[in-house]
Structure formats: structure tokens, C-alpha cells
Image (tube, rainbow, N blue to C red):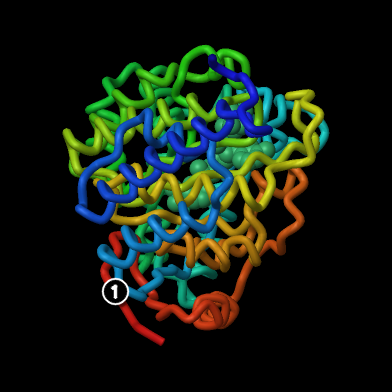
Amino acid sequence: MPGRSFFGLNPQPLCRKIRAMQTFENISTKVHDGRRISAEEALFLFGSNDLLAIGELAALVNERKNGRNVFFNVNRHINPTNICVNRCAFCAFSRTAGEDGAYTLALNEICRRAEEAQTEGATEVHIVGGLHPDLAFEFYEEALDAIRRIAPALHIKAFTAVEIEYFSRISGLSIEAVFTRLIAAGLGSMPGGGAEILVEDVRQKICPEKISGARWLEIIRLAHLAGLKTNATMLYGHLEEARDRVAHMELLRDLQDETSGFQAFIPLAFQPENSDLKLDIKGTSGLDDLKTLAISRIFLDNFDHIKAYWVMLGEKIAQVSLAFGVNDLDGTVVEEKIGHEAGAATPQSLTKEGIIRLIAKADKLPVERDTLYRPLRSF
Ligand code: V47
Ligand code: SF4
């Protein structure tokens, strides 16, 4: 009879434990054979707290793809404006025009920062910002063109799919035409922001004004068709559930099967301070961070790179993640606003030497890369 005690043993938890062991064995066999795991299996892994077993599988997947190499790049973030018409509930960075702390950088200040980055050895500028109600599309076009002239050695990685869609709306241009114009002005690739959680009911709660998940995917598809590589992020640790994370990653995996345009997947740990999402949480746990990175490494078999963004994770968890399937550590950054406005306790920047030390102390080989993952130097 189900659940009845037999010689003092309760058979139900025992059966569950055996079933769980069998499921893990099946997943492990698939991963060892180089086969893809299903969404259900990824969800099972989220339900398990056997972090070391999950990490071992992720490390195996990563080892096959990247050996002991861990990539990093020397970059600088520039956020041209924090004024944004969307005001997503989780975002502590954005302001309404006229509000305390609202800012917009002048073109020459954007150029000064880019030039300084180039002088200091950066190979990339990472440019994202708010959806400004008054700046014209031409401002962004001019900014790229000016950066290209003043700092020609820099790769310009700029604008989320959310910004691209906004540019199309304010300019009356099609998405394709926006890409053509920005590429002509110097755009080299796109970061992975704005994805948040692509599942619509969660998205409606955390960023109701933002373009839908389906539209985000469509714009990224068009970016890939236009020849731009992009990243993909996932904002986790707020009110989403494990099944939302898996559904999010499955949408990305499907698109990657179609376009091969994604370079890296970057889980972003939610920083709860100063956000309008009134959740009774203090931020993600180290266990959840490592599990999420490891499961993404196992599940996203068609992504070459899983990136740990140390700004949100903290340097120590980012370092430990290198044993849990991660092969990319972002970056020198220099000035970070999005996470720090939301309470991130990390420094504003890491030196190149600091990143090399983090990687080497994790018994990995530091490889400086360019934005398109071409190795520049090993250390
Ligand atoms: O889309 C906003 C996230 C993203 C918070 O592609 C928050 O190489 C945590 O996308 N807590 C922008 N996250 C940053 C981003 C990114 C960062 C580093 C590298 C790359 C890349 C991309 O930041 C937003 C949003 O998902 N974000 N607020 C917060 N409170
Ligand atoms: Fe604006 Fe992006 Fe912040 Fe949303 S996350 S409010 S779109 S800057």
C-alpha cells in the first residue's frame, strides 16, 4: 500500500530517491555521450541540490569545448543616458527626465571615454542606455561614427534589442534599416541585455512596458541575419520560477539552432536594492548562481561560451564558477552603473592583472580575447 511503513521504512521517499537517481543517471549518460538534454531534464536539475554532481557535468561539457582556457576581454562600459521611458520595475538605473540623478552624456564626453579606453588598452566599448524620450536616432548614429574615428582600434558592441526596436519606432525606419545604418556607422556586435525573462507572464510583472519576449527574439533574429553577433542574458533571482528559466533558455537554444548568431549566454543575478520590485529577498544565493550557470552550460549545448558577469556575482563566485562550466569572465568594465545603482557590492572595475590572477588561481589558463572571441594573448 503506497506510503505505508514497512519495518519502520517509509517506501515513498525511498522510491522518489531511487527515481531521482535514475533520472540523474540518464542525464549524466546523455551528457557523457554528447547528447542534448530536454527541458524536463533541465528542470529536474534545478530541483536538485547536488551542486557538485551538476557542476561536474557542466565542467565536462565546458572542458570539451574550451579545454582549460578561460577568456576575458579588456573593455569599458559607457551608458550614454539613464533617462528611460520604460522604467522597468527591477531597474534601479533608470530615471525619468528631470528626476534627481538623471543624466545624458554629451557626444564629446562619450568620445572622451572611448578614447581613454583605447589609450588604456581596451579592445571594446560596451554601450547601452535608457530609451530617451527626446534624443533622435541620429544622435546614436553620430556617436558610433565619432567613436570609430577617434578610437578606431575599439570594437563597438552596442544597443540591446530593446533599444534597436525603440530606434526603429522613433525614426520610422524598419529594423533592417536601423541595422544597416548602425553597421555603416561602426556597430560591430550587440550585447545580450533586455532579454530578462522571455516568458510573457513574468515579463508583464517585471517590465510591462518593455517589448515582448517574442519581439526581443525577432529583433535578435534580424540582427543575426544582418551579420551581427549578439549575446543573450537572463535576469534571474526575482519572481521567476525554475520552469521560467528553462523556458527562457529553450527559446534561446531554438533560435541558436536556427541562426548560430549567439556568442555567449550570461545569467545576470538580480540585485534587489532600490528596485520597485518589492520582493522580500536579499539577492541570489551562491548555490543558485553556480547551479544556474552550470545548468545553462549543460542545456545550451549550441552556445560556445557561458560568461560570468562578476559585477553581479561578486568576484569570488565568478572565480568558483570557472569550475562549474563557465569559460568567460567579463571584463575590466571600468565604470558600471546598472548593477551598482541596484546595490552591487563589487568594485567599479577590475584591472587586467586582477582578472588574470582570478583565472590563474582557479587553475585555468587566462586568454585575452577580442569581442568576436579571437584569442589575442595567453598568460
Ligand atoms: O537588460 C538591470 C540587467 C541588463 C538589474 O552582453 C539588472 O556582454 C541585475 O545586459 N540586477 C543590462 N541585473 C546589462 C547587460 C550585460 C551586462 C554585461 C555583459 C553583457 C554582454 C550584457 O542588466 C539589463 C537587465 O537585464 N539589470 N537591472 C538589477 N537590478
Ligand atoms: Fe530602461 Fe533598460 Fe532600465 Fe528597462 S532595464 S528601465 S529599458 S534602462
| Viewer-proximal residue among 78 and 205 | 205
Tag 1 secondary structure: strand
All told, the count of numbered labels is 1
| In the image, residue 101 above or below residue 373 | above
Where is residue 12 shown, x and y percent of the image? 56, 26
Q: In this view, does 237 lie above or below 116?
A: above
Give the residue at x 34% y 62%: 60
Q: Quadrant of the C terminus?
A: bottom left
The picture places residue 111, in percent across and down from the top left corner, at 51, 58
Residue 363's spot in the image, x, y percent? 48, 81
Q: Identify the residue under disc 1.
A: 375
**Left or right: where 89 falls relative to 183:** right
**Residue appearing at x 73%, y 51% in the figure:** 344
Q: For this rendering, which residue is in front, 131 or 62?
A: 62
Identified at 35% across, 70% down, the residue is: 369
In the image, ligand 2 is in what quadrant?
A: top right
Q: In which quarter of the image is the N terminus?
A: top right
Q: Is mark 1 within 8 Å of ligand 1?
A: no
Callout 1 amino acid: Pro
Seen from the viewer's position, the closer of residues 308 and 195 is 308
Quadrant in the picture for residue 326:
bottom left
102 sits to left or right of 162: right
Image position of 366 (left or right of 11): left
